[in-house]
Image: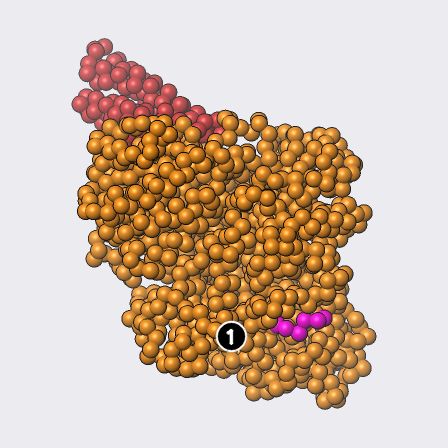
Amino acid sequence: MAFSFPAFSYIIALIIDAFLIFFSIFHVIAFDELKTDYKNPIDQCNSLNPLVLPEYLLHLFINVLFLLSQEWFALIINLPLIIYHIFRYRNRPVMSGPGLYDPTSIMNADVLTVCQREGWIKLAFYLLSFFIYLYGMIVVLIAV
Amino acid sequence: MFGIIGARRGCARHIPSTGPTPCDSPKPSRDRNSEPSFCVSSRHPSNDYQVMANIPPYNSSSGQSNTALGPYQFNQVPPNHFTGSVKHDANSNMPPPAFNNQANHYSQSASSSPAFNNPMMMPPQNMQSSPIRPSIKPSTNQSPIPNLQNIPSSSASPHPMYNTNNPSPYPPNHHSQQINDNAPPLIPSSQYNQPTNGPNPTRLPVSQYPPSSASFPPPINQRPPFPPLSQPVPFGNQMVGPPRSNLMMPGSSTLGPNMMAPPLAPSRNNAMNGPATGPPLTSLPGPNDLPRNQTSGPPSLPSGPMPPIRPPTNQSMAMGPPTQAMGYSNNLSGPQSLPLLSSQQPISGQPPMPGAMPGLPKPNIQSRYPQMPPSNYQQGPPSQGMPPQIPQQAMYQQMNKMPGLTQQMGQLNVTQQGFDQLWGHQMVDLMQCKHILSEYPEDPPEIRLGPNFAEAPNCSPEIFRCTINKIPDTNSLLQKSRLPLGILIHPFKDLNYLPVIQCTTIVRCRACRTYINPFVYFVDGKRWKCNLCYRVNDLPEEFQYDPVSKSYGDPTRRPEIKSATIEFIAPSEYMLRPPQPAVYLFLLDVSQIARESGYLDLVCGIIKEHLEQLPGDARTQIGFICYDAHIHYYVISDGLTRPQELTVLDIDEVFLPSPESLLVNVGEQRDMVRELLTQIPRRHSGPGSPASALGAALQAAYKLMSPTGGRITVFQTCLPNIGPGALQSREDPNARSSKEVAHLNPATDFYKRLALDCSGAQIAVDLFLLSSQYCDLATLSGMSKFSGGSVYHIPVFNAARPRQATHLRNMFTRYLTRKIGFEAVMRVRCSRGITIHTFHGNFFVRSTDLLSLPNVSPDAGFGMQLTIEESLSDLQQVCFQAALLYTSSKGERRIRVHTMALPIATTLTDVLHAADQTCIVGLLSKMAVDRCVTASMSEAKEALINVAIDVLSAHKLSQNLPAGPASSALMAPIALRLLPMFLLALMKTKALRTGTSTRLDERVAAMCDLKCQPLPQLLRTVYPDLYPIHTLEQHTHKDESEEEEVNPDPPRLQLTSERINLNGAYLLDDGETMVIYVCNAVSPAFLSEIFGVAAFSQLPDEATALPHLDNKSSSILHAFIDKLNDDRPYPSNLIVLRDNSPSRTKFTERLIEDRVESAFSYYEFLQHVKSQVK
């Protein structure tokens, strides 16, 4: 029973992951609102876009911690998502501000479906990884 | 009936014969909103409703008990009741003089008349009723009907006019209409069950004539522009007899066999004897001809009765050969048919054509009628596939040599064709049928609704059009058909005729907010069932009242139920704020390049000329901002004697120096505005700054306009290079012809964000790009795309070039004077189960079915891709409703509602044969542009080719045609026969072509056009019309009603150099320009009559005008050009080229069926498609 750096990274990861879960829930709700006409796409994009980079950075931050604490398993399961995030951001529409979502193209049914599906998958992934981090934290803590 | 006639007479009385429209107001106001009750409500002063335009004639039928006739009734109105009254859009801004000065013919296009679902009926009305343009070519794609005045004014039925006293040619497109009109399908189909009937079995695939109506003859003998060469007997009136009786034969058993058997017999003997036909076919004809002849009637001997009967047959068959040769376009003219026939000979070694023949009837018959047991006939073993086809091929060879045979086959063809047509299932072999384009524009395929709504007026195909006229009932069926599903809509089209209603409550469904429309179901007198969501709603009391007949009790007489396109004047609950005034702001580039181009003088002059004609009311405001490196504002106020210029040097922090007097009221300050418009070009005539701060100027304009909303018109001539929104040149001139086109995406989102801000403030930005260099239109167009504006591009503009100056003048005049709707939204509702996938056009999508259109213009078209989310199989029909809510320039809130209903299809065959090829091309072009931007150009082109391959594969599948490339035929449903050609043409348009040097800006401008042009214009851009003008006189019909008028109506030619004769002259019309191409061997008489020169060498290399010479040929040609110009927003440019002019490529590059560098010819394209079709 020792409070080591890996244990610290897992604890931080757990907290951040809770935030990420909220982010993705918000994402799913936002796109559902768009689909059901409740919100103007300009407003919706204005509220979604500022959250994109923080989400990506938080996720990246966890993985930096895992890297430093040499928790390879946790890092590997997150690696695909990091790559996806980089890919996604590189291929964003031309826009001056930060963010991914362009109000003029977001109402396209394809884009809408993709974004909504992305939200659900991320939500599932973050939930799953929450329990993995929990497990990892306990393992690290009871080890020694 | 009385109601309408009375009303119309009333109109006619009020209107002086010179008056342009019946609804015109005493003062020369251009907007007719203000005189709503002229025609009807003045006669019913006490009612709540004001029917503002003329009620469509068929509405008036509600005054009569006989409503069964439905929309056709109006044809019974003697034409002279219409003569005095031009039907005009009640809301039109068109100044009456526009009729004469050619500025705005578009508004008068004949399309919008009451006969929405009934295009065939329209021409008479329109032509009769328009005193100014008697030679309207109805723009429903209906072929022109030249001699309408032949219709007796009292004719009881609209139909006979086509047959009886109409010796002149007719386009073939009426048939489908005819079929529908008097429901002939019953005759032949019942017929078909009787095996004894002659004509059925020999069903050749390529044909169009319906055997349909016993009541009128098939139009075979109509419109023979030339007598077919193979046919010595001239067409005479007596021709009407024989073909009719022959065709009637299936129905009338007494007459039939006599007439029919003889012609049949030889053809069978010669041609059909072999095992040629597959089992289903052979169950009917096949080798059992003789026995069947005997059973079928007295003249059992094949050759016996023939000689006596032959002469009439000859005559009636005169059109036979061309018919077969052409496939369906039976109006082939003689000279053309000749090469055609000969061209069949070489090919006839192959079996493609016959392949079609056995293949075709089989599924039809099988699917609809129990197959005859082959044992009934002395039928050999049913054989299918290649070998049997050869005898038929031999037959075709013989046909070319034996006119008699040809005729007989043609006659069979006619009959058998009819069956196919009744089912709408003809096919055509694309590889064989080279002359596939019909010579006269065709109708869009007809929408046939179920029995409940067969009479209901559907929306005009000019306004609302679906790619498939029968919606597949499930998504999997749609996927199987591989067709794109979508609608094209032209919501704010200038209509000649539009019922306008003002009432206290607009009846809408409480659940889905659908407006009541002709396709709702009345549960009882008090309730109605929504046709989109199926909720049962209450009917307000006042809906029981019919404003036309002033009677209570029958809600179906209301104009809302009688017309699929209707306009409501909205009460205040449809306003978020008081209706805005018309506000126009002009942003003029005065940088060095702009000054060199000289546009400023021209544009200011045009604005000055049309200041009075700007649509608007007393509140109309106007303003001007010029910009180069700085922004120049112009202050006009009462305190000043002259307009004052304020120049703001700071372009990074834009502010308005004097917000209140930058926009001035046009009416109050007209003289000052004129003064200013004179001053601006002078002020900016010297050398100027090379910089252009467009971004800053736009921000200033946004600040200025945002309190009211309105329209910003930007004139830009160079790349904006300083201040916010500055751009860098991205084009690589060396890559103009490369395979991959880069930089189709915007470089910055500055203009898009600005457009979104503008859209939120109800401002539209229209861009006139008069560039002489690369301007990055891909980025700049964002300001118009997302604010509901429009983009106009004239490359390398210089006002000193008369052609470009005229072009800009025409374009800008139309732009200034056309109708405009402010702060508009358009919502498109679909039946449950269908959702909108993607929108195409210029707008901002505010929610899944709502488009925000700060301005809506009559020249803007929109497209929507649809998806089928739930099964539709429990529905009777699918409805679409587009509702456009806008503020008219007179400050009225109005709602224009278009409703279209489509039947459901359950089989793949039905879906494929109900396709609307022109609409498909329209939608595909928009999708291809999107694909170019999101992916790449090569991917977009590949996708287009795949559409053709997939669709033809699907068709092959549905028809159980022999699989694999073994068969040398490439069968296509007749409804899709032009699709490969149009797709090829699309790939060769400026927007999508590769390999030919194309400026990036021009390409992007062409893409913008594809995205937002209405369908007829788009199609003309994709596949220009080519007319022979050296034979114009032969195709001219004298308009008898007006002595002076001629109505030239030459056939269209396919775009291939095969159709260009050295001794001809041709007119190629792509909407933007009309190119007259004079070949070097043209007759000197033609040259002197048309151009006033004696010899070919005296023609200039490139002329931009045609001299008006005082002779018949010249006046006919001018009449023809005027006629072509009638149905477009502004007259096209004219260029005259010799065939050895340096710029002849302007003409030759549009011959898209020919091979050009790095692009397929049509035949190669077909080969390619065929090799891929599985």
Q: Give the image location of residue B1167, x and y in percent.
A: 42, 68
Q: Give the image location of residue B609, x and y in percent.
A: 41, 48
Name the residue at 60% across, 75% down.
B224
Name the residue at 77% across, 83% down.
B300
The answer to whether residue B834 shows anywhere in this view is no
Quarter-wise, where is residue B322 in the image? bottom right
The chain identifier of the residue carrying mark 1 reads B
Q: Main secondary structure of the magenta part?
A: loop
Image color mode:
by chain
Residue at the disc numbered 1: B1112
Shown colour of chain B:
orange
In this view of the protein, which residue sits in the foreground, B735 or A60? B735
- Which lettered chain is shown in red? A
Q: Give the image location of residue A8, x and y in percent.
A: 23, 15
Name the residue at 64% across, 59% down.
B128
Q: Give the image location of residue B1098, x and y in percent.
A: 33, 78
Q: From what the image shows, is residue B365 above or below residue B754?
A: below
A13 with respect to B867 (left or right): left
B851 with respect to B53 (left or right): left
Please provide the residue range marked out in magenta: B164-171
Tally the marks: 1
Inspect the image, locate mark 1, and give the three-letter code of the amino acid beneath it.
Lys
Q: From what the image shows, is residue B608 above or below residue B710?
A: below
Q: Is residue B168 magenta?
A: yes
Dot 1 crowding, Cα within 10 Å, few <14, some 14–19, many 20+: few
Q: From what the image shows, is residue B329 above or below residue B118?
A: below
Name the residue at 21% across, 57% down.
B734
B8 with respect to B731 (left or right): right
- Report helix, strand or loop for mark 1: helix
